[in-house]
Image (spheres, helix red, strand yellow):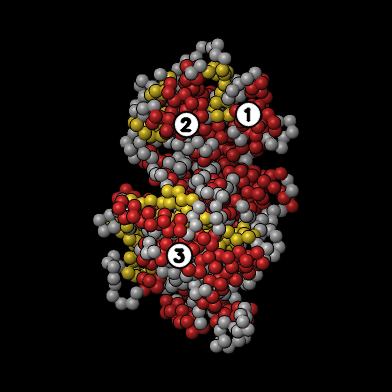
Amino acid sequence: MQTHLADFIKDSAAGQEADAILRKCTHCGFCLANCPTYRLLGDELDSPRGRIYQIKQVLEGEAPTESIQLHLDRCLTCRACETTCPSGVEYGRLADLGREIVEEQVPRRGLQRWVRTGLRTVLPRPRLFGTLLTMGRLTRPLVPGPLRKKIRPRRPAPAWPSPSTHSRFVLMLEGCVQPALEPPINPQTARLMDELGIAVKRTTEVSCCGAIDQHLGASEAAKARIRSNIDAWWPHIEAGAEAIVVNASGCGAQVKDYGHLLADDPDYAEKAARVTALAIDPIELLERHADQLAPADDAPRRVAFQTPCTLQHAQKLNGRVDALMARIGFDMTPVPDAHICCGSAGTYSVLQPKMAEQLRTQKLENLNTGEPQVIATANIGCLTHLDEASEIPVRHWLELIKVA
Amino acid sequence: MPAHALFRDEDLRFDVDVDPLIDALRQVLPEEGLIVHEAGLRAYECDGLAPYKQLPRLVVVPETIEQVQTVLRLCHEAGVPVVTRGSGTSLSGGSLPHPQGVLLAMGKFNRIREIDHHRRIARVEPGVRNLAITEAAAPYGLYYAPDPSSQIACSIGGNVGENAGGVHCLKYGLTVHNVLAVKVITMEGELTTIGSESLDSPGLDLLALMHGSEGMLGVIVEVTVKLLPNPLTKQVLMASFADVESGGHAVAGLIARGIIPGGLEMMDGAAIQAAEDFVQAGYDTDAAAILICELDGSEAEVADQLKAVDECLRDHGATRIQVAADDEEKARFWAGRKAAFPAVGRISPDYYCMDGTIPRKQLAYVLRRISEISAAEALETVNVFHAGDGNLHPLILFDGNQPGQLEAAERVGSAILQLCVEVGGTVTGEHGVGVEKINEMCVQFAGAEIEQFHGIKAAFDEKGLLNPGKAIPTLNRCAEFGRLHVHNGELPHPELERL
């Protein structure tokens, strides 16, 4: 596609990256087919191609408007469009950049502003979030409707494995909201690793991966967080950590992007690239140990796997968890439209509740096609969002397996 | 932007104050169903033919048939042109907006109303994606045959409007052969049904007329399509050739032996590489050309055909033949072909996709001439096309950011289309004329024929409000175009009075 970027951006690194992305787009429209918002709304402005066009206008010097902001807000950044795109357009990067510029020039008003600031303040802080969630649990009946549904009862967690003498060890991102919302996931991940002879070195000073800031148009704040995470991990990496296991695929996608995000930072570019190379989703490690794995004793066998967008479209690991689970003895039920987002999408379910709910209804209907006993997933966001409305339990897939 | 004006003076005779229309439309449309701000209009300024851009006056996105009727009635009263758009994937600029008009976006009409597997029909809204019909029919062992490469996204309403083809049309026909009925709203706002659920209808065949009418006769709001049972078995094979011309001869040879494959497609070197980069289909990237051939039918029939095809391809110099091992590989062989156009976006910032059709025996000659024509303008051409029915899709590569390159690409394109007509072919096989090939229509048809086309259009749309300036050139346009393209010292239409 022809481009004429405006002076304010055309010579910057971000501008050049955006130009290269835009020039790959041939305006063929294939992306419309798999865009959750276009499928619901049927308006070019709510399609990837339409959003690319709107971002292009801003990059070419048009003043951004509230309308553009609205259509960018509605985008889930699920990146199904990237999987669909034959030309290789990196829509997600363009969307982040577009959001950042629009955010600077179109101020948020009233409640919207407070909600967004609130999310960026509370979510990345596990202790603050945990305290608020505990308070919420105690006062649940008094909490207003939409928020009340987000307050999950606390599920008991297994114990962390005792400190081990394994020579192999990995780091693990424990995440910001995950420990409070679904306490079993992290210790369960560590137990599986431990039983496979791999120690998990905990780095509790690392919590949020930076994705929340990143996708709410605050890339500088995200970068600061990324740098501090790298600092915390670095001594362990130098000591021989063989991987950084990220068991929430949303965070995993972000950590795998550190190398790109800090590519222009002379002090961190190399370290960030190393972190990216080390970051893995648990499936990448566990499928190498498939022979040692089995369904957990109490796990139902008929499972529908909901593949998070961040696992399939961002990390490109589609089909791998399903294949492993089938191989070790689960009966995986069919899931139509598995490539379409469930509506969770980070903070989306809070910021765009109506769209998120519509997408969730569709997703649950598709997940229940084969009458599964449980829905498994690989991302905390999808898990809690689906669980709010699901009649059958929704679990992280790591909770359903054991080392035999 | 293209070298010639998109619209001519006579296409721009609708200078109407649209403010009262906007007020009236606001009363009937949902809140976000009326787009008047420039940033919003801009996203609708082009379709799949992206270098051709035109802002509409306003965009309407209706939700119900009643709303479409009211929109059309109001536009008819006000004398405002209407251009209908589905998924906006047209490669000929069929849904390029009119500068004085309304762009009617049908994206919200995306429901499948009925799948009747006993009668093997589907009744769908016009914004339903082509592939979505096949997906919905799949549980019954049925599918919808026409499958343009953009089938993942293109909508059935647009398929009817452009009489879309695709890989399987060689054996199973174009859209016109697979549609039973359409519901159409006339420019006056009247809802009418054309065709029926039986195979024949009394009176003139207006259903055929609607196909390829490029939004100039009415607005399609429902389509009833035929569904076919999945073939008992099918096999896909891929043959490599050391040069493009041998591939061309092989295609003519296959058809001459009386074999009609389910699909017979050809890609040349650069296209093979780009598609391989996207899908990792296992294409032979060393080949100068590959032919993908699908055979379908009963086990015995397919086995027989496979043998004959293999023999014929080897006779014509195939250097390697791969037969898909399983269903997944069959799907992969096709996936690269289906995504080949946009995949070329990986190797060139812009491309211009042509759509001429020629007699199959001329394939080798025309392919050679195409590379000569583009070389003369210092441009590269990539070929991906429906070889079996002689429907060429040369992709002329250019860089829109380099001054003069689009114009050069257009010159190459026009020369290719004229070459197609010269060897006894046509300027379009399945993409429609739109705004892209409108000048070349003057080469294809004589003035008297063009006048008859305009007469038919006027019978449906007296004021000429539906998609003006597309598909059928005005005689003035032809006169001017003819003046520019003197061939062998002769104007294409000596009978026309020159301006």
Front tag of 2 and 1: 1
Q: Point out the residue furthest to the left here.
A: B118
Residue picked out by circle 3: B252
Viewer-closest of A68 and B20? A68
Q: Is residue B358 left or right of residue B406?
A: left
Q: Which mark is residue A388?
A: none
N-term-proximal mark, 2 vs 1: 1
Name the quadrant of the N terminus of chain A.
bottom right
Disc 3 + disc 2, Cβ < 8 Å: no
Q: Residue at x 36, y 20 (%)?
A: A297
Q: Residue at x 61, y 43 (%)?
A: A93
From the top left corner, tell me how far across and down residue A49 is, in percent. 55, 53
Task: Tell me which amino acid carries mark 3.
Answer: Ala
Residue picked out by circle 2: A378
Task: Tell me which amino acid carries mark 1.
Answer: Val
From the top left corner, tell me how far across and down residue B51 is, in percent. 61, 62
Looking at the rendered structure, the secondary structure element under dot 3 is helix
Front tag of 3 and 1: 3
For residue B421, above or below residue A294: below
Near mark 2 (Cα within 10 A), the count class, few <14, some 14-19 or many ≥20, is many
Q: Is residue B270 left or right of residue A336?
A: right
Looking at the rendered structure, the secondary structure element under dot 1 is helix
Q: Chain of mark 3?
A: B
Q: Chain of mark 2?
A: A
Near mark 1 (Cα within 10 A), the count class, few <14, some 14-19 or many ≥20, is many
Looking at the rendered structure, the secondary structure element under dot 2 is loop
Task: Tell me which amino acid carries mark 2.
Answer: Ala
Residue picked out by circle 1: A275
Disc 2 + disc 1, Cβ < 8 Å: no
- Compute the Cα span from label 2 to label 1: 21 Å
Q: Chain of mark 1?
A: A
